[in-house]
Image (tube, grey):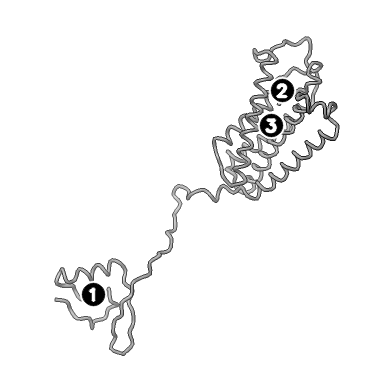
Amino acid sequence: METTTAKGADAAISPATPATILGMSTAAFTTLHVAISLAGIASGIVVVVCMLTSTELDFWTGVFLATTVLTSATGFLFHAEKVLPSHIVGVLSLVLLAAAILALYAFGLAGAWRAVYVITAVTSLYLNVFVLVVQSFLKVPALHALAPKGSEPPFAIAQGIVLILFVALGVLAVRRFHPEQNQGPALGERVTPPAETSQAKRRPVSTGHNRPWVVRFDEDAETLLELAPVLGQVEPSAMQRVLGRDDRIPRLA
């Protein structure tokens, strides 16, 4: 995503300025700038796709934010005699990226910051793709022949399709990206155990009134009853606690 247009590159570079940028020739620096911008676009596509599936990938998110910041920052290093539209796009992109970084790393996507992050990240990616389309129509001969001035219908149609696509992606991402639903419990947070799937065991006990009633046994009580024949004796008080204090239970010998 070269920040100076091909048609105006020669005019934008001042003859009095050195032909190197950060110790590299202008051609070498331009190649590096384009490589960084393409990496930002590629990683940004991965991030947006993950947003649509409500998945958060820390590595790709970091790559996207870092390379997109570098794309905008390195664009200002090209020697220019005046402020170009690409500089305005770069400033806007850096402001959006600053908001996205704050929303993600400082505020943890809490509350409205989730939507702020999605909107600013998707818009930053759109600006990168917007400039990529501009440069494609300037540098690719087949596309340049369709819109040599950059104002012809083919160029407008291409940018219109890109805009509609990113608006749709942004709306879907805001609706679907809820990473907090995929996170486990926080450290120290009490987790309520799931409801027991097995029902308490029941055994009928005759009350002498021709009306059976049931007593729920937990595992400890059941174990106590099973061990009664082995131990040879169970204290009445223990049996009464288990069986609802029914003193009509015969003592086991």
Q: Which residue is mark 2?
A: 76
In the rendered view, tell whether residue 109 sits above or below residue 138.
Answer: below
Residue shown at 65% from the left, 13% from the top: 24
Residue shown at 70% from the left, 20% from the top: 77
Other residues around mark 3 within 10 Å, as few (<14) / some (14–19) / many (≥20):
some
In the rendered view, tell whether residue 85 sits above or below residue 183.
Answer: above
Other residues around mark 1 within 10 Å, as few (<14) / some (14–19) / many (≥20):
many
Q: Which quadrant of the figure has residue 43?
A: top right
Please name the amino acid that badge 2 sits on. Answer: Phe
Q: Position of residue 230 (x, y in %)?
A: 16, 68
Gap in Å between the C-alphas at discs 1 and 3?
A: 76 Å
Of residues 159 and 247, the one nearer the viewer is: 159
Q: Which residue is mark 3?
A: 94
Residue shown at 78% from the left, 36% from the top: 158
Q: Which quadrant of the figure has residue 136?
A: top right
Tell me the SS state at disc 3.
helix
Q: Position of residue 94 (x, y in %)?
A: 69, 31
Please name the amino acid that badge 3 sits on. Answer: Leu
Of residues 117 and 129, the one nearer the viewer is: 129
> What is the quadrant of the N terminus in the image?
top right
Q: Position of residue 182 (x, y in %)?
A: 53, 49
Label at residue 132: none
Gap in Å between the C-alphas at discs 3 and 2?
A: 11 Å
Tell me the SS state at disc 1.
helix
Q: Is residue 169 left or right of residue 85?
A: left
Residue shown at 69% from the left, 44% from the top: 170
Q: Which residue is mark 1?
A: 239
Tell me the SS state at disc 2.
loop
